[in-house]
Amino acid sequence: MSLLSELSELSELSLPLPFRALDTATDVEPSLAAALCSVASALALLLRNGVPLDHALALVERMENGTRAGTEISTWRQRLAGGHGKFSDMAQPGRAFPPLFIWLVAHGREDLAAGFQRAADMYQTRATHRAELLLYSALPEWSQTLGMIFS
């Protein structure tokens, strides 16, 4: 099981019911954002180095074999083979890839490598920011707890 699918399932279980829809639309947990960043970075790297889109998708699909992301990427490949040349037509938001991810990549228009890189950069920044927020919000409480234990 890949990291992306494990984190996707974990994020669904850890959020209260009203917030699950927000998770897929606009809000992504730091670990899931990091997994999305990895997929986007891999696709950007492959495309920048001249690998055709169908081959790049096949490689990332194999990397995510047996996961929701792998299934969605397989669907992207089928739509690409069916003649859907525009990324926004080929890729539809799903459980593994939120609408913002699709929009960021599609916004690259003809340069999909730049679109995937933009998505990777954005999700990396979000993952870092959320992790820092968590760290800085918990750090004062941890230091107080340690102070009480060792005093």
Image (cartoon, helix red, strand yellow):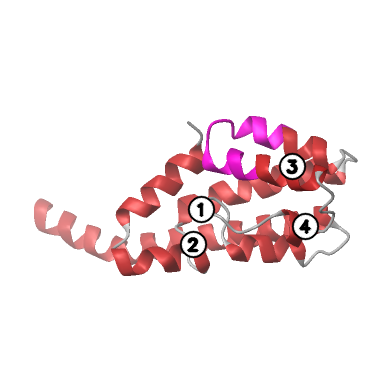
**Residue drawn at the location 37% of the way across and 61% of the way down:** 134
What whole-number distance in Å separates the C-alpha atoms at marks 1 and 4?
Answer: 17 Å
Give the amino acid at mark 3. Arg
Task: Check residue 64 for magenta coloring.
Answer: yes
Q: Is residue 15 above or below residue 13?
A: below
Q: In front: 74, or 47?
A: 74
**Residue drawn at the location 74% of the way across and 34% of the way down:** 58
CB under 8 Å between discs 4 and 2: no
Name the image quarter holding residue 63. Answer: top right
Q: Is residue 44 above or below residue 16?
A: above
Give the amino acid at mark 2. Thr
* Magenta residue span: 59-73
Label placed on residue 77: 3
Q: On the picture, is 11 further left or further right than 117?
A: left
Label placed on residue 95: 1
Q: Residues within 10 Å of mark 3 (few under 14, many from 20)?
A: many
Q: Position of residue 65 (x, y in %)?
A: 58, 31
CB under 8 Å between discs 2 and 1: yes
Can residue 72 be seen?
yes
CB under 8 Å between discs 3 and 1: no
Label 4 belongs to which residue? Answer: 87
What whole-number distance in Å separates the C-alpha atoms at marks 2 and 1?
Answer: 7 Å
Give the amino acid at mark 4. Phe
**Residue drawn at the location 81% of the way across and 58% of the way down:** 114
Q: Position of residue 133 (x, y in %)?
A: 41, 65
Task: State which tag comes first along the sequence, 2 or 3.
Answer: 2
**Residue drawn at the location 51% of the way across and 34% of the way down:** 2
Quadrant of the rendering where the C terminus is positioned: bottom left
What whole-number distance in Å separates the C-alpha atoms at marks 2 and 3?
Answer: 22 Å
What whole-number distance in Å separates the C-alpha atoms at marks 3 and 1?
Answer: 17 Å
